[in-house]
Amino acid sequence: MVRSRWGCFVLIVVFVAAALITLLAWLTVHHPANTKPVLSVRQNVQLAWHYVAPHSVREVTDPTNVLVLVNPWNRLPASYVPPDLVRLSIPYLNPGDPENHLMRKVAVPALMALIEAAKHDGIYLAGVSAFRSYATQDWLYHYYIRTQGLKVAQQYSAKPGTSEHQTGLAIDLSGSTGQYAAEPQFAQTPEGKWLAKHVTQFGFIIRYPQGMKKITGYAYEAWHIRYVGKKVATFMMRHHFTLEQYVQYEQFLKVHHITP
Ligand SMILES: [Zn+2]
């Protein structure tokens, strides 16, 4: 009788100890401090710097997203035309070409504000090319190949479907004289310098910065600006991010339910 009571006591102690250990283990795993992602936001910002371009091409599934990523590895559907294109009333180098005077509604007020602010600083900007349809890009790409060869075409003209101009969120700008329009020397013109300094204030980015070809897929284009909104543009400038790096960073936040 004594032995069995002793045995019962030991059993209860073992059971309680096991229950406590299980509870402690559960609390350790689910404690808020331990459910945080492996990497902090700051660490991921650093990680995004080590972005490696993908090896395959995929079709974009969210073409109307303001932060849509279009590059040689992320192709827009051939049939995609932005649903809210608006005709721009800004000076144009080639006023006779109506298609490339279009831009998505969301970016237009920001672009108008940018052009006006530049004018205020004595910088007179003109549009070169904004929206471009898949068919136009197809023609342009093959025109570049015919006239300047495949190598130049690949460097300065996107393959159809991989051009940001099809998003309606990008525009090429030049000075109103058209000097060095869409040429590398544009970066050294007063207009090019003004753009580099001020675009982010209006929610735009220089989409293809210098030395980022491995990430963006394109050589430096001081004239090609892309609308992403002020908040994102400011963040990207602060971290010297390309859009590819920013999108990777944003995905990380989403996966780990982090509010920046
Ligand atoms: Zn462009």
Image: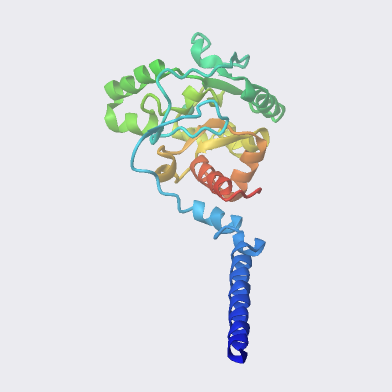
- Measuring from the top left, give residue 72's x and y in whole percent: 38, 34
- Measuring from the top left, give residue 76's x and y in whole percent: 43, 26
Q: Is residue 28 above or below residue 219?
A: below
Q: Which residue is drawn at 35% across and 17% down?
A: 139
Viewed as shown, does residue 159 lie left or right of 109?
Answer: left
Q: Which residue is drawn at 63% across and 45% down?
A: 235
Q: Which of 257 and 44 is in front in this view?
A: 257
- Measuring from the top left, give residue 6's x and y in whole percent: 61, 88
Q: Residue at x 62, y 69 (%)?
A: 23
Quarter of the figure with the N terminus: bottom right
Q: In this view, does 19 lie above or below 197?
A: below
Location of residue 135 (image quadrant)? top left
Viewed as shown, does residue 111 lie left or right of 216?
Answer: right
Q: How many numbered marks are there?
A: 0
Q: Is residue 251 above or below residue 163?
A: below
- Measuring from the top left, give residue 63's x and y in whole percent: 50, 27
Q: Which of 35 and 249 is in front in this view?
A: 35
Q: Nearer the viewer, residue 125 or 75?
A: 75
Figure colour scheme: rainbow
Q: Can residue 176 be seen in this view?
A: no
Q: Which of 92 and 178 is in front in this view?
A: 92
Query: Of all residues shown, which one is farthest toward the bottom?
Result: 2
Q: Is residue 194 visible?
A: yes
Query: Of all residues shown, which one is farthest toward the right?
Result: 120
